[in-house]
Image (cartoon, rainbow, N blue to C red):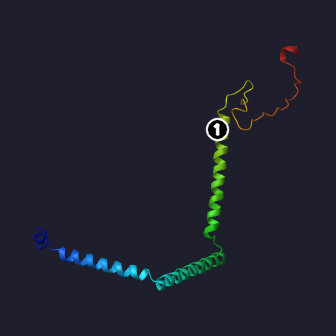
Amino acid sequence: MAEKEKDTDPMALWRDMLSQWETNVNALANKTMASDEYSSSMHGAMGGMLKLQDTMKQFMATYLATANLPSRTEVLAIAERIGGLEARLDRMNALLERIASAPRGDAGDAVTSTAAFAAPIVPIARPRPPRTKSPPAAES
């Protein structure tokens, strides 16, 4: 039965050839990677790539400084600082909204309590001007 299917399948020969090729290449690659020469050459190649990458990083830093442009680390530092400022503004907005929506007391000032806010807001007592004018009924 299997022989009959092989005769009718036009790609069977191709699959067999591909499977044998894959097996042989796998064996050769395993044998090559197991050698000390391969390991030392790969170590040298990786060391060279790291040296090239470091040289390019230094070159780009010099180029950007010469062109008066910020480097990647400087842009990331600025972005981090802006994020911190935005977070502070969000906290300030939330606090202002809580103050605006706080219940009002008799004098129209916001009622403040330690339970409502982390730091209580104490209204400033402003001196009122002295009343020097008497009411019209008292003048006559």
Q: How many marks?
A: 1
- Height in image: 64 above or below 108? below
In percent of width and height, residue 121 lies at 75, 36
Write the residue at 49% across / 81% down: 39
In percent of width and height, residue 48 lies at 55, 83
- Height in image: 114 above or below 79? above
For disc 1, the marked residue is 97
Q: Is residue 93 left or right of residue 106?
A: left
Write the residue at 65% across / 67% down: 74
User: Which amino acid, mark 1?
Assistant: Glu
Q: 102 and 131: which one is in front?
A: 102
In percent of width and height, residue 18 lies at 26, 77
Q: Quadrant of the C terminus?
A: top right
Q: Quadrant of the N terminus?
A: bottom left
Q: Quadrant of residue 70?
A: bottom right
In percent of width and height, residue 134 lies at 87, 20
Q: Quadrant of residue 14?
A: bottom left
Q: Quadrant of residue 94?
A: top right
Write the residue at 65% across / 62% down: 78
Give the secondary structure at mark 1: helix
Q: 54 and 21: which one is in front?
A: 21
Callout 1 environment at 10 Å: few (<14), some (14 to 19), or many (20+)? few
